[in-house]
Amino acid sequence: MIEEELKKYIRAVPDFPQKGIVFRDVTPLLLEPQIFKNALEAMGRRFESLSVECVVGIESRGFIFGAPLAQMLDVGFALVRKPGKLPSKVKRVDYDLEYGSDALEIHADSILSGQKVLIVDDLLATGGTAAACETLVESAGGEVVGATFLIELLALQGRKSLITTEVHSVIDY
């Protein structure tokens, strides 16, 4: 099973970035070209038939998986970043975190009206950032056809934040 094979390349780092958190480090997987390719194929396979027209990667590890996935699907790639990091006109969405708030931005010309978009990130936790990205894509005129993640932390129920989006994860913890 692909999930079990890929899990061998995910390093668990206890108490990072704070005590009580187990960080799922994908860098060992990235060091193995065939394993990385297998992960990308597993992330994208489900969406091949949906006529995806653009992949949107969420800063920063969503870039690592999103750009090659866009190439595999033969579509464009758009960046969703924290505020102030994109040099041209942007669309922005503010969203609430457990303790405070944050924002995401995308270049205003990244998504065409009606364009079918796949959201990509390395990990789905609480779903707040992914839901904000979904809102941002829709405000730019895109149609989110799915969201794919290498890893999902099931106990945090992040997929509940993406109410109307098909969510796919390869590895569940």
Image (cartoon, rainbow, N blue to C red):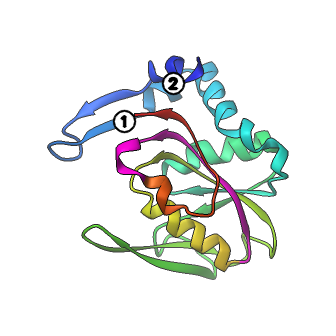
Residue receiving disc 2: 31
Front residue of 171 and 136: 171
Determine if the magenta segment contains residue 144. yes
Other-residue count near label 1 (Cα within 10 Å), few / some / many at <14 / 14–19 / ≥20: some
60 to 4, vertically: above or below: below
Front residue of 78 and 152: 152
Which element type, helix, strand or loop, lies under badge 1? Answer: strand
Q: Earlier in the sequence, mark 2 or mark 1?
A: 1
Q: Is residue 81 left or right of residue 143?
A: left
Where is residue 12 shown, x and y percent of the image? 31, 29
Residue receiving disc 1: 24
Q: Is residue 18 left or right of residue 115?
A: left
Determine if the magenta segment contains residue 145. yes
Where is residue 118 shown, x and y percent of the image? 69, 55
Front residue of 130 and 65: 130
Q: Is residue 169 left or right of residue 153?
A: right
Which residue is drawn at the image coordinates 73% and 76% (left, top)? 109
Residue numbers of the magenta segment = 141-157
From mark 2 to mark 1, how far is it between C-alphas? 15 Å
